[in-house]
Amino acid sequence: MSVLVDVVNAVTGVGQQISDFINVGIYTLLTKFAAQLIKWYVAAMWKAKLAALVFSWGTAQELLSSLNVSSYLNTAWSSLESRTLSMLVFFRVPEAVNIIISAAATKFVFRFFGF
């Protein structure tokens, strides 16, 4: 008789485990799957943005060189008097202007990608 009780308890235990999986386990499984999917999507999106940024920067540099922006800037800097120019060079204003123009051109090209 104890064997029959053990078999019934085992069947009941298996049924309880199946019920627990259906009620709790599927939710946990789907939650973990969704979290992994979202992590993968975020990583893929950032990799795509990085690749697009590298490409945009190269394109922006080519755009600036084809528009000959550096010669216009050099002409503008040379039209300043020497004392003003030396003070601006001391504070590295020409480098800052160059960085700002490069960033603006990169942002302009980057917007074509939809980012």
Image (cartoon, helix red, strand yellow):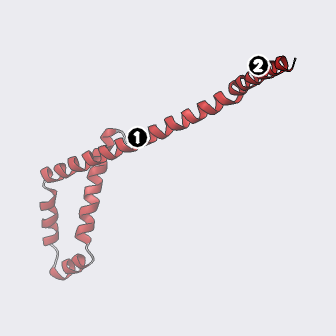
Helix, strand or loop at mark 2: helix
Judge whether 108 appears above or below 78 on screen: above
Q: In the displayed image of the protein, which residue is found farthest to the right?
A: 1
Q: Which residue is mark 1?
A: 45
Residue type, label 2 = Val
Residue type, label 1 = Met
What is the x, y in percent for residue 41?
45, 37
Residue drawn 57% across and 36% down? 32
Query: Quadrant of the image for the C terminus?
Result: top left
Residue drawn 79% across and 21% down? 12
Splitting the image into 4 quarters, where does residue 77 fall? bottom left
What is the x, y in percent for residue 98?
23, 63
Tell me the mark number nearer the camera, choosing from 2 and 1.
2
Tag count: 2
Residue drawn 26% across and 71% down? 93
Splitting the image into 4 quarters, where does residue 97 fall? bottom left
Compare marks 2 and 1 and give the one earlier in the sequence. 2
Q: Which mark is residue 11?
A: 2
Helix, strand or loop at mark 1: helix
Splitting the image into 4 quarters, where does residue 52 fall? top left
Residue drawn 14% across and 66% down? 74
